[in-house]
Amino acid sequence: MGLLLEGKNILVMGVRNKWSIAWGIAQAAYKEGAKLIFTYQGQREGESVKELISEMEGTEACQCDITVDSDIDRLFETIREKYGTIHGLVHAIAFANREDLLNDFVYTSREGFAHALDVSAYSLVAVARRAKDLMTQGGSIVTLTYMGSEKVFPGYNVMGVAKAALETSVKYLAANLGPAGIRVNAISAGPIKTMSARGIKDFSNILEVVEKKAPLRRSINLEELGHTALYLLSGLSSAVTGEVLHVDCGYNIMGI
Ligand SMILES: NC(=O)c1ccc[n+]([C@@H]2O[C@H](COP(=O)([O-])OP(=O)(O)OC[C@H]3O[C@@H](n4cnc5c(N)ncnc54)[C@H](O)[C@@H]3O)[C@@H](O)[C@H]2O)c1
């Protein structure tokens, strides 16, 4: 078998630093021959992303704040001009206001609720709509979710609601875009230490419980997420769409 993603242009959204899940996925995709285009939120993230990708030949990074429509339009216009077609998109973006993760869920503000859902769920719809016009040979869109959409995890709060919206968006997008040969799936990742995870106040406790209770008695690593994303981005999963695939050492099957 040749390289899994040879000749594929893949847009990777959500690298912040070397611990980012999107970076784990990008490294796996690059090794399998993909040509990568990165986005970063703002100047600070841009510096770190540019440093990370400096050794990845032929890759580039563009600024895109996912809450700003003109940023998204400019990004896809640049990609259309430079690459014409894309074959894959990795969406690994989420955000909730700090106070909405620290206080009880019942105190979530209207603004905090709307903002978390805008950045963490609507953003997938916004990018899928633009990506479909460039996925002229079909494509694969992969997003990242967490089991906090299905069950209560203390401190995950409004992010759990946003992930539920994201997972249902995956299904509606899969149904809309399937006739064009575009697949849309989510990876439900087990807890892994990243900058975003640090914002969840009970994160170390969650990690400890998972390591004790998951059938495999551990949590996951970035490489394992990269490998799952390779499966979803490549032809290996050509008949899989609208799925939420748990990559969590089996934790989700446990009742207690
Ligand atoms: N770390 C975990 O335990 C875990 C588990 C399951 C799912 N996830 C999900 O994985 C995804 C990636 O998170 P991560 O853990 O790698 O953390 P991370 O902090 O490295 O990545 C989050 C990214 O979202 C970006 N982002 C936030 N607001 C943005 C905006 N307005 N515009 C553009 N980009 C914006 C940040 O710049 C950052 O690159 C998220 O969707 C997260 O919910 C994480």
Image (cartoon, rainbow, N blue to C red):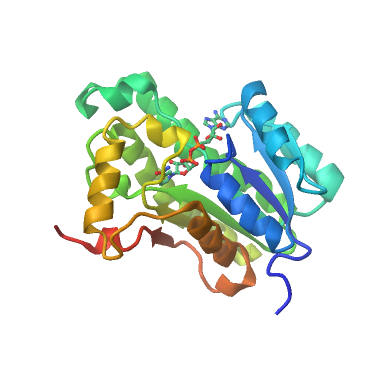
Q: How many marks?
A: 0
Residue projecting furthest to the left: 256
- In the displayed structure, 154 sits above or below 111; it is below
Q: Residue at x 38, y 20 (%)?
A: 111
Is residue 150 visible in this depiction of the protein? Answer: yes
- Residue 92: image x %, image y %? 53, 43
Q: Residue at x 46, y 33 (%)?
A: 195
Compared across the picture, whether 55 is left or right of 228 comes to right
Q: Residue at x 47, y 32 (%)?
A: 118
Is residue 89 visible in this depiction of the protein? Answer: no
- Residue 8: image x %, image y %? 74, 60
Residue projecting furthest to the right: 82
- In the displayed structure, 57 sits above or below 47; it is below
Q: Residue at x 46, y 40 (%)?
A: 121
Compared across the picture, whether 155 is left or right of 222 comes to left
- Residue 153: image x %, image y %? 24, 41
